[in-house]
């Protein structure tokens, strides 16, 4: 003789829900235990735990009337509960998408800021190079001032051009500083400190 197979937990849950759908009434725990044991072949000792799990999951309603606790579930309630869950999940999805969009904007803003900073560093390096070259030219002028007037004139012309170039690069740095301050709301002092821009940076006279 084959051994009788027990009823699974999921099957017990389904059968108890069927009781509410078929009867369309309110029941006490004792009444549910009696019907479940007699009509649904569920071991009476397990009914209370299965019923409480259904209540916890929002699949069965419960409430106290006086000293007694009643349980009930009508077919339309599961649809309403599902719709509420869908609405809640939709709200969470919208909030998550909004946060994701904000993060993308912040990442893009950070990328632009880094790009602008790289350009500023290049400008500073070019200005520094031109200033060093100007100093070397001035040393040559001092050295050869008594030897070759034509050579001095050529060197002075070159020095003038380098000074103009240095002032152009300085002007470019000021323009980038102004753009960064307006776009990223950062003070000039913070910009200078972060990128080692001299506080006394100015045009060469």
Image: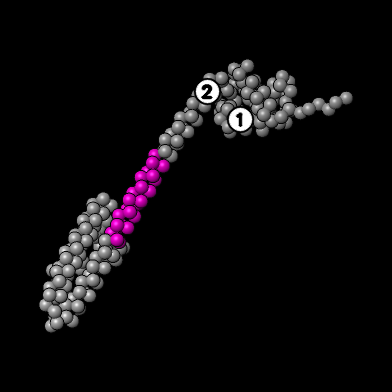
- Which residue does the image show at 14% across and 75% down from the upper left? 152
Label 2: which residue? 79
| Residue where numbered disc 1 is placed | 54
Query: Please, is residue 26 above or below residue 52 in the view?
Result: above
Image location (x, y in percent) of residue 183: 26, 50
Determine if residue 118 is in view.
yes
The residue sitting at 13% across, 83% down in the picture is 146
Of all residues shown, which one is farthest toward the right?
1
Within 10 Å of disc 1 (Cα), the crowding (few <14, some 14-19, many 20+) is some
Relative placement, left or right, of 64 versus 103 is right
Q: Nearer the viewer, residue 139 or 194?
A: 139
Relative side of 8 to 89, left or right: right
Question: 44 and 63: which one is in front?
Answer: 44
Q: Which residue is found at the position 23% from the left and 71% from the top?
A: 133
Q: How far apart are marks 2 and 1 (CA)?
A: 15 Å
From this view, report whether residue 125 is shown above or below residue 175: below
Q: Is residue 181 visible?
A: no
Q: Quadrant of the C terminus?
A: bottom left
For label 2, the crowd category at 10 Å Cα-Cα, with few meaning under 14, some 14 to 19 and many 20 or more, is few
- Here the colouring is one colour
Residue at left offset 67%, top offset 23%: 15
Q: Which of 56 and 186 is in front in this view?
A: 186
Give percent across and percent down for residue 22: 63, 16
Q: Is residue 202 above or below residue 139?
A: above
Q: Main secondary structure of the magenta part?
A: helix
The image quadrant of residue 51 is top right
Q: The N terminus is located in which quarter?
A: top right
Q: What stretch is highlighted in magenta?
A: 98-122
């Amino acid at each position: 003789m084959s051994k009788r197979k027990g009823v699974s937990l999921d099957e017990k849950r389904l059968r108890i829900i069927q009781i509410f759908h078929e009867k369309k009434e309110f029941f006490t725990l004792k009444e549910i235990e009696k019907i479940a044991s007699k009509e649904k072949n569920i071991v009476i000792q397990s009914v209370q735990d299965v019923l409480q799990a259904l209540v916890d999951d929002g699949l069965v309603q419960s409430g106290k009337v006086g000293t007694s606790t009643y349980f009930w579930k009508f077919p339309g309630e599961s649809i309403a509960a599902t719709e509420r869950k869908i609405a809640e999940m939709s709200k969470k999805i919208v909030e998550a998408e909004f946060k994701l969009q904000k993060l993308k904007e912040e990442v893009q803003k950070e990328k632009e800021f880094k790009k602008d900073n790289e350009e500023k560093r290049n400008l500073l390096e070019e200005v520094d190079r031109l200033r060093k070259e100007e100093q070397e030219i001035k040393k040559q002028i001092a050295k050869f001032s008594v030897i070759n007037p034509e050579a001095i004139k050529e060197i002075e012309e070159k020095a003038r051009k380098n000074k103009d170039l240095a002032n152009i690069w300085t002007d470019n740095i000021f323009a980038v500083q102004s753009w960064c301050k307006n776009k990223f709301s950062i003070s000039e002092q913070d910009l200078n400190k972060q990128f080692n821009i001299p506080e006394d940076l100015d045009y060469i006279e």
